[in-house]
Amino acid sequence: MASRHRLKATTAVPSKSKFVESIFLISQRFSLFTVFDDFLTMSIAACTQNPKTGKSWYEDEYMERIAKYKDSELRHEFSKAFAYLVDEMETRFSSPEGNDVLGEFFEQHISNGRNGQFFTPNHICRFMAQMTHDETKEMETSLRILDPACGSGRMLLASHKICGRGNEYYGIDIDLTCVKMTALNLFFNGVFGSEVLCANALLPEDFVISYHVSFLPLGIFKIEKKEESRLWHLLKNSLTEDVLRTNGSEIILDPTPFSERKKDDSTQLDLF
Ligand SMILES: C[S@@+](CC[C@H](N)C(=O)[O-])C[C@H]1O[C@@H](n2cnc3c(N)ncnc32)[C@H](O)[C@@H]1O
């Protein structure tokens, strides 16, 4: 992952997306990865207000991230990027390509497929979600849907659209930037009650941080202790039993294949 920290935009990239243009504009002086990751952190902070102070619950983190952008024009560009993102996601809400603007940016401009970070095209996400729906629609219980290597969370977005509310949606990713993208995607698409965990999904005790996407109170809330994460408990238990059944719900594992791959191995594309 170290290589992506060196990515730097030297010229503005012509794009139809104002969001993309905005992030590139800010990254004239900072690496693209730094700007994008700061944007995600600050956007999450902007989505949670402490009613007692009227400020974000994560005001300190926001201030720490914005501090290096001394130029006030650059600082204002972050709020513009936020507005452009919301606008673009809203416009594309019902489009066949989906509205994973963040994931597309990450895939095209930051990961470039490194570490297996290709994301599933939306029509395949919808197809898989439809299969899940068809196989489970007669069930009287709600579903618990998990993508254990969620990337930007687009499988979960498609599942929520097709399987609907009333189910539980969870994501795990080892990469914190991906976890933040998923949390924002779930929030902006109204997948409330969901949780995204940053951990190695293959290691029962691993826990970095988790984000709970909530409707009341409205926001994206950090869970910093693993014992307070519902998803961490579910993951831990699911790794010791083949199938975990709790409260009448079933765990459905997204069959996203993942294996250790050599750095230059591009066979990940074969998955699609
Ligand atoms: C091929 S992408 C798939 C993303 C998403 N499921 C989709 O279909 O669009 C694989 C993702 O798995 C994550 N990953 C790799 N190893 C992991 C592990 N051991 N635990 C959790 N996530 C992992 C990567 O960071 C990457 O975002």
Image (spheres, rainbow, N blue to C red):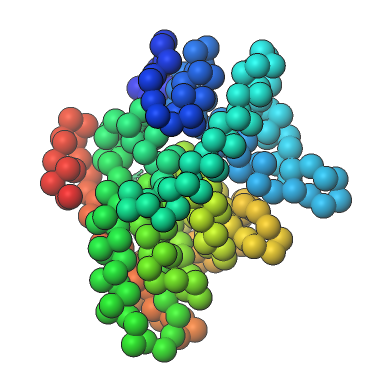
Which quadrant of the rendered structure holds the N terminus? top left
- Relative height, residue 133 to residue 171 (above, below): below
The percent position of residue 252, horizontal first and vertical second, equals 34, 71
Residue found at x 85% / y 45%: 53
In this view of the protein, which residue sits in the foreground, 36 or 171?
36
Q: Quadrant of residue 64?
A: top right
- Relative height, residue 61 to residue 53 (above, below): above
- Relative height, residue 269 to residue 255 (above, below): above
Residue found at x 73% / y 37%: 59
The percent position of residue 225, horizontal first and vertical second, equals 61, 55
Q: Is residue 184 left or right of residue 100?
A: right
In this view of the protein, which residue sits in the foreground, 236 or 164?
164
Residue found at x 35% / y 22%: 3
The percent position of residue 117, horizontal first and vertical second, equals 30, 40
Q: Is residue 56 left or right of residue 127?
A: right
Residue found at x 32% / y 80%: 136
In this view of the protein, which residue sits in the foreground, 263 or 236?
263
Q: Is residue 97 left or right of residue 42?
A: left
The percent position of residue 126, horizontal first and vertical second, equals 30, 61
Q: Is residue 201 visible?
A: no
Q: Is residue 27 left or right of residue 262?
A: right
Q: Quadrant of residue 164?
A: bottom left
Most extreme residue toward the right is: 52
Q: Is residue 57 visible?
A: yes
How many numbered discs sit on the rendered protein? Answer: 0
- Relative height, residue 32 to residue 99 (above, below): above
Q: Quadrant of residue 161?
A: bottom left
